[in-house]
Amino acid sequence: MKVYISADIEGVASICHKNETDKSSPDWAKFADQMTYEVACACEGAMEAGATEIVVKDAHWTGLNINHLKLPTGVKLIRGWSGHPYLMMQEIDNTFDACIMVGYHSQAMSGGNPLSHTLSGLRVQSIKINENFASEFLINSFISQSHEVPVVLLTGDYELCRNAKKLNSHITTVESIQGIGNSVLSKHPLETGDDIKKESYYALQKRSECHIILPLKYELEVSFNRPQFAYSASFFPEAELSSPTTVKFRHKKILEIMKFIKFTVCPDL
């Protein structure tokens, strides 16, 4: 069994402030350690479930957060950014049997996490797909399913986990934090790790139940923070400037949607 793990930091246990996500801040190191620990727990559970190959994408900011030495031997780690439009899902393909998402967070315009955003808080106010506010979990689930790889486990904040069940009623979730205004309520970080290991094992047993039905077409709506970002993005082929700060783009394939996102929302990755 081959397993893909995409890992972020804003949904790990106890995290609350943007300084804790920033590699240049002294607060970052302990949460990078927690991110590594939670990924390691997911790997251990997957191996107990029969995984013989695991590929992890360090998908937070610089892509240089996870300590490879603290992951189980044999686990492959993707660090940095290749420039591929799949971004947080780089190297996913139909050779994988299941996908796990660790440390994920609620979407932009959500109160579920003080660190809520979608892909780029520096450029984007919100992203919608088919008129619904989109989280990174939603977008990456579409990418994974486009390769017939089911997302079996999601760990992160309470609101994200609750919303994930609406997309995939069979997905297993581990709630690490609950956003309350600009604060979080969190269980002990070691308990979160224990739960991730246990639920990773369980989720992979029922992976065949976790496939989702993809939309027939995608209508992407990106609301940028500044008019100049939207104006520039409107020159992407087939894109439409619908307001001074909003651009729409439509396509039947998620890869084409991700190409638009890569070159307009995340040009530096």
Image: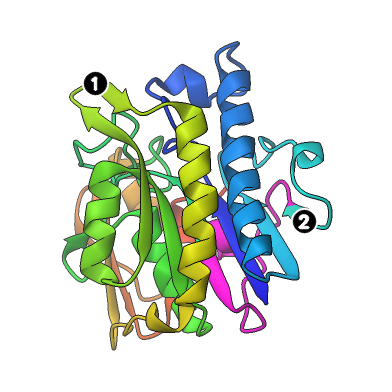
Q: Which residue is mark 2?
A: 75
Residue drawn at x 68%, y 74% is: 2
Coordinates of residue 103 in the picture (x, y in percent): 47, 43
Q: Is residue 122 magenta?
A: no
Q: Which residues are magenta?
A: 78-99
Mark in front: 1 vs 2: 2
- Tell me, for residue 91, which label it has, or none: none
Q: Secondary structure at mark 2?
A: loop
Circle 2: residue type: Val
> Residue 187 is drawn in which quadrant?
top left
Residue 221 seen in the figure:
no
Coordinates of residue 160 in the picture (x, y in percent): 28, 49
In the drawing, does residue 95 fall left or right of residue 150? right
Circle 1: residue type: Asn
Q: Main secondary structure of the magenta part?
A: loop
The colouring scheme, among rainbow, by chain, secondary structure or one colour, is rainbow
- Tell me, for residue 182, which label it has, or none: 1
Residue drawn at x 52%, y 70% is: 204
Coordinates of residue 34 in the picture (x, y in percent): 57, 30
Q: Please report contact status of discs 1 and 2: CB closer than 8 Å, yes or no.
A: no
Residue drawn at x 29%, y 71% is: 168
Residue drawn at x 68%, y 38% is: 66
Label whose residue precedes the other's in the sequence (1 or 2): 2
Q: Is residue 257 above or below residue 44?
A: below
Q: Is residue 9 above or below residue 97?
A: above
Quarter containing the N terminus: bottom right
Q: Is residue 144 above or below residue 72?
A: below
- The one nearer the camera, 238 or 200, is 200
